[in-house]
Amino acid sequence: MKLDILAFGAHPDDVELGCGATIAKEISLGKSVGIIDLTRGELGTRGTAETRDIEASNASKILKVSVRGNLGFRDGFFKNNVKNQLEIIKMLRKYKPEIVLCNAIEDRHIDHGKGSKLVSDACFLSGLVKIETSLDGKIQEVWRPKLVYHYIQWKNIEPDFVVDVSDFMEIKMEAIKAYQTQFYNPNSKEPESPITSKNFLDSVLYRAQDLGRLIGSNYGEGFTVERYLAVNSLNDLK
């Protein structure tokens, strides 16, 4: 299956929080989108790997993504090494995305920056003909995505561009709330963490509102780039 867009997250819920509305918008425009989680989030303060599996499946149905996979890397301790790069290369060559979305380049959680660099490096390596991979007993063709974008997470990193997602924030928030063990629940008896507060959940909305304000819309999601953006004419800029 070829995908137009493949989004990677270090943990289940990273993609929903960082670019869930953009994904929902692209799907509404007829694009095929998949999500690959690097870990099962087993070190999360609340819930378990098993509950995260269920929640990720439910969120995927809400977003209507074509496929979702999990590479099962070790939460908190995975490394940007040959073994993990090859696993990501296999996914890139399997789905052949034109665009890859991945974690913030630097963030509060150490897995976010690591995941960002790991996926970015794999995107380059995936285009090298002398790196051979096989999947299901078949040698894979090389593939390098045309574009790699990084979504914004905990830290307020200055975006290089902002997507107008005004009509898709409701879907994004519904997908986020599918992770019932992870976010604000006044009845939960589990330990508190920085992401379990009401303020954190509210911040998803007010960040999107502020980015929307800056581009003249109701809501926006920001991304950073690895190379200059190219346009055909000034009319492409809004």
Image (tube, rainbow, N blue to C red):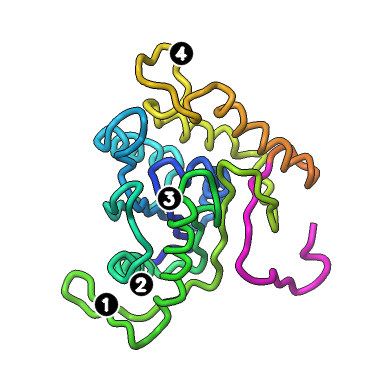
Task: Pick whichever, 197 or 68, lies toward us.
Answer: 197
Q: Which residue is mark 3?
A: 111
| Residue 125 at x, y percent in the picture | 41, 77
Give the residue type at disc 4: Pro
Q: Is residue 202 left or right of residue 84?
A: right
| Residue 178 at x, y percent in the picture | 41, 31
Picture residue at 56% right of the left edge, 69% below the top: 147
Q: Residue furthest top?
A: 187
Quadrant of the snapshot with the N terminus: bottom left
Q: Are marks 3 and 1 in contact (CB under 8 Å)?
A: no
Quarter residue 211 falls in: top right
Give the residue type at disc 3: Asp
Quarter residue 227 falls in: bottom right
Task: Pick whichever, 216 or 149, lies toward us.
Answer: 149
Give the residue type at disc 1: Thr
Mark before the other along the chain sequence, 4 or 3: 3
Q: Residues within 10 Å of mark 2 (few under 14, many from 20)?
A: many
Give above or below for 107 relative to 224.
Answer: above
Q: Which residue is mark 1?
A: 133
- Magenta span covers which residues? 220-238
Q: Is residue 167 left or right of residue 139?
A: right
Q: Looking at the image, is mark 4 or mark 3 nearer the viewer?
A: 3
Give above or below for 194 relative to 65.
Answer: above
